[in-house]
Amino acid sequence: MTQSEASVELIPADAYPPLLPMPLRAEALLTLRSAETLASANSIIALRSASLREAVHELIRQMRSAGRTASWISVYAAAHEIRGLAGTAGLSATGRIANGFCHYLDAVARQRIEPELDVVKLHLDAIARSARTEADTARHGDAVARELSELVARKLSEINESETH
Amino acid sequence: MQRSRTALSAMPESAFAYLKVLVVEDNPHMRALLRSLLLALGIRQVVEAENGQQALSLLRENQPDLILTDLSMRPMDGIEFVREIRNSESTVNPYIPIIMVTGHTERHHVEAARDAGVTEVLAKPITAQNLFQRIGEVVERPRAYVRCDKFFGPDRRRHRREDYAGPFRRRDDYETDDDNSGEESS
């Protein structure tokens, strides 16, 4: 037996108490997979979407304000919250744009370089606009999200290339 | 934390009714949403904390059965919180299932969560379907745990591939006849 084999202990799942005892598992899985439970949960999300959107709009205000002073950590923090909430609030394009923006800001921060102001401005404007024009989100927002996602992919590739040289 | 038979026989309509869940999330909207979605499953005992530090202080007195935690929080984030639960000598239950609910979908964040010992990762934006699917994983497939010098947490190998050619580094790779192969996943 090698040293690495001896130092690894595998503890089987039946060695500790499960989340639910066996007799309840089947019933729990039925609940989790039932159309009725899902519909009830989705209606809860729908009921909360107005307050979630309010929260997203407030975060956008905070993000733009942080952007004006180039406080990138605060911009990232707000964009991160937006990507987490927007999709559940029904603002899927806003969430996707914020997600790409976070990936970009995360990559430049890890490389300790400043973000390009044009890239930042494009994202800040697109996030604000897509969240405002809810009715058009599906049509215009999706197209903008796609284009910005391509831009982020290009930028990430440039950053990765500079990392390898 | 297994409940007594008496508690089970007196159990109301949902299989989840006697579970206690700890939700650790700094965003009040997300906390409220998670609580409501858990309630839709019949989970009535939900304890909330705004960060890892607060959650640790709630753990002992509440002894939850399942934890849903965010990653980015201050003063203690989700990664440090999970490490404390898995590795601290004073931990209440190192085997507790932990679902990390996070918008941090960058690879290095997901790897950090895995290395800290989370059971499942759920990417935001959350949907009811995704949340229920992750809880279902925890219910249906309790994970084996691995303890070694630098890690204690759920076994990352969820599947065993028939055609896996090695390397075989664990004792159980040799001890089981029917499970003769392994694969690093997640």
Image (cartoon, rainbow, N blue to C red):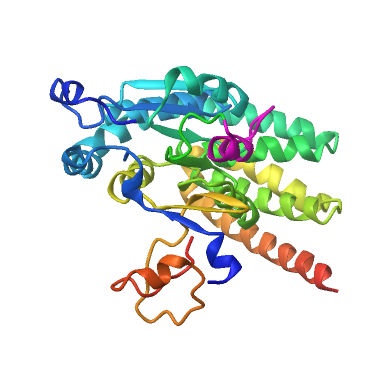
| Quarter of the picture holding the C terminus of chain A | bottom right
Which one is nearer the viewer's eye here, B72 or A42?
B72
Which one is nearer the viewer's eye here, A51 or A74?
A74
Q: Position of residue A115 (x, y in %)?
A: 82, 51
Q: Position of residue A26 (x, y in %)?
A: 17, 44
Residue A87 seen anywhere in this rendered image of the structure:
no
Q: Is residue A7 magenta?
A: no
Q: Position of residue B47 (x, y in %)?
A: 44, 21
Position above or below: B66 against A13: above
Residue furthest to the left in view is B9
Position above or below: B109 against B72: below
Q: Is residue B135 left or right of residue B72?
A: left
Which one is nearer the viewer's eye here, A62 or B147?
B147
Position above or below: A120 against B177: above
Position above or below: A161 against B121: below
Q: Quadrant of residue B63?
A: top left
Q: Is residue B77 magenta?
A: yes
The residue under the point 69% across, 48% down is A123
Give, as a single range, the part of the protein colored magenta: B72-89
The residue under the point 49% across, 60% down is B186
Residue B38 seen anywhere in this rendered image of the structure:
yes
Q: Position of residue A127 (x, y in %)?
A: 63, 42
